[in-house]
Image (spheres, grey):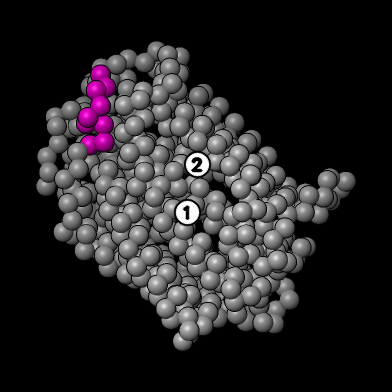
Amino acid sequence: MPTRPARWAWATEPTLQRRGVTHSAQALSGRFVQGPIAPTLLRFALPLLLTNFLHAVSGTWGAIWVGQVLGPDALSAVVTANVILYMLMGAVMGIGTAAGVAIGQSLGGGDLAAVKRVVGSAVAFVVGFSLLVAAGGWLLAPALVDGMGTPAAARAYNITHLRFTCLAMPSIFTYLVMMMMMRAAGDAHTPFKFTLLWIGLSMVLAPLLLTGWGGLPRLGIAALGVANLLANGLALCGLLLYIHLKRSPIALHGEDLRHLRPEPVLLGLLVRRGVPMALETLVVQGAYFTLLAMVNRHGAATAAAYAGAAQLWAYVQMPANAVAASMSAMAAMNIGAGHWPRVEQIAWRGCGLSFVISVASTLLMYALGDAPLRLFIPAGGEVLALAWHINLLALWGWIALSASMGLFAIMRANGAMLPPMLIFGVTMWALRVPFAEWLSPALGADAIWWSFPFGSVGAALIAVLYYRWGGWRQHQPMLASIEIPADEVHVGE
């Protein structure tokens, strides 16, 4: 296994205190580099799994109200906005991932000074970028909706929902990056508490504003975006206050605030490492964008059925995402500490956990039949039958994705951001999209549904091969090329 410079060896308690590392930060990182692997992964993954579950429930809740109040044509607006939202989120998630890896490695190496600088640069970037994205999304919403070949009956709904979703982006993007950095520092419980506030409040506000209950303004489809903006804005303010008062390892106090004016070299490093993750999101969501355009060619009923079926996919993907995030945080700290045999154990035990949970959730979804779909497809008939048919063909493919997500998380924990993006690029654009396009004459819309498991299995196979024989282990620590004084003392600490 590769060796690491001496400054990345696990620091003793006096060294940690000299570098400004608080006892809470030491306890968090110590648990990740010394505690039992599987129980720690599960404890860390559970809050994130519940967070993802809450997000999925919130999306389902909004879709139920939209489908019941405004009809199936409005339901397609929810899917369209989500595809574009996740596509635009790519750059933010890239910076968040890169910052999280740097924070995890720095805490594992006992260097809190590096953590503070990374946090300042990441926050400055995400705030500026999200404001530009929100403004551009509002202006370009009609062109984006038309470019997807949206049926005429759903066009107005799509434009309105997309525009108000864009208004919420600055708050949401900043909140997401703050959560990613907190998890990288080993704290998954605090983000869950504030996400519970965000989701709970948005679930209350959305139907009230959608229907105009109790004299409130009846906003229609715009209610989802407005509710998200209000609820997330409150959660973000609460999270920032909590981080400040509790002196979290990622908190900026006193002179630490100067890091909000990012150093060009450090920001450039984060952007360069974040670009592959951003491109990965663009590649993946771009493929979904293309597939959604194919779905729309089959008419309004197929588009509505796909929108309903896709609402359930998030529940099957949640375990893989939660466990992968836990694996990345734990692996980054162990890489910073130089514990490579432990990194290998994290990879395989984490993938095993993710696989078992993904199988169980998929089987549960199949056992429930079309009952969940009836929540937001009240009319039944052709749309409901087609949505159930889509899930029969496509749902199981997300099990294979659990292996890919886990192994990619380990690679990214060592700063290897490019290989996962290239693998997804190949499986999306060389396997999934051509499969759907070329077999459509023979299979019709079924070619689209079969393309999902086909691409997922292909990604899993390539991920296993690259993890075993690829060169991702040879990457240097993320901040190895950045000069950061190890003994810097922070006034805020």
Can you see residue 478? yes
Reading the chain from its start, which is encountered first: label 2 or label 1? 1
Q: Residue at x 78, y 62 (%)?
A: 69
Q: Which residue is mark 1?
A: 49
Residue type for callout 1? Leu
Asked whether, in this view, residue 135 is left or right of residue 31, the answer is right
Looking at the rendering, the stretch of residues picked out in magenta corresponds to 477-485
Is 153 contained in the magenta span?
Answer: no
Residue 397 drawn at (x, y percent): 41, 72
Q: Residue at x 21, y 53 (%)?
A: 344
Q: In the picture shown, does residue 120 fall above or below 72?
A: above
Of the pair 103 and 50, the residue shown nearer to us: 103
Can residue 190 be seen here? The reply is no
Q: Is residue 120 above or below residue 258?
A: below
Who's the residue at 50% across and 36% down the image?
Answer: 129
Residue 297 position by quadrant: bottom right
At 64% from the left and 75% from the top, the residue drawn is: 299
Residue that mark 2 sits on: 176
Q: Looking at the picture, tell me which residue is in the foreground, 424 or 43.
A: 424
The quarter in which the C terminus is drawn is: top left
Prevailing secondary structure of the magenta residues: loop
Q: Position of residue 385 (x, y in %)?
A: 62, 82
